[in-house]
Amino acid sequence: MATICSGVRAASTVGSMSPSEIVTAFIEAIERKDVAAAAAMASPSISYENMPMQPIIGRDSMAATLEMFLGNANEVDWVIVRQHEVGNVVFNERIDRFQIGDGWLELPLAGVFEVDADGLISLWRDYFDLASYQRQLAELTES
């Protein structure tokens, strides 16, 4: 389950869930490695942006990319350090953790999500240090 250490929520809601609750449920699906459930919470035209890489456009492309990122992980734990919501935009500071073999890849990052009027995530942008990710992944996957 996504661990939220602190957060502020505005009064905005989409259906019965606020944008912040939608993003948290999305992260919880990813932690379960349930890519289908996560994809169901994304707009068909989602823009998934891992900065500084090129945007990935569309639900199916996002799902394929998630499958790739989660493929080596035995366990996934995304700690939400803080999360704030302003209207339909959710900002969070996270530590995305992936257990690979006997070790953990830990990636501090900042995420930005936009939730559309239908309650679907239409933008997911994560800012992180790509070199740190690549270095840790190489160390954990060396055979």
Image (cartoon, rainbow, N blue to C red):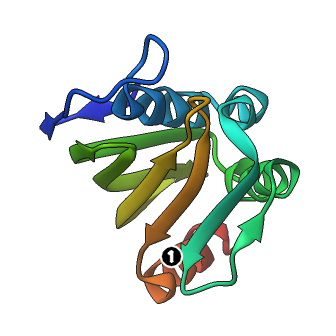
In depth, the one of 128 and 43 nearer the eye is: 43
Residue 19: percent from the left, percent from the top? 40, 33
Q: SS at mark 1?
A: helix
- Whole-percent x, y for residue 26 in the image: 54, 33
- Residue drawn at the location 84% of the way across and 58% of the way down: 61
The quarter of the picture where the C terminus appears is bottom right
Direction from residue 8 to residue 31 in the image, left or right: right
Rendered view: 115 above or below 19: below
Q: Is residue 102 visible?
A: no
Amino acid type indicated by mark 1 = Tyr
**Residue ID for mark 1:** 133
Q: Position of residue 7 (x, y in %)?
A: 15, 38
Foreground residue among 113 and 76:
113
The relative height of residue 73 versus residue 28 in the rendered view (above or below) is below
Q: Residue at x 54, y 57 (%)?
A: 124
| Residue 82 visible in the displayed image | yes
**Extreme residue in the top direction:** 16
Residue 62: percent from the left, percent from the top?
A: 76, 55
Q: Residue at x 71, y 43 (%)?
A: 43
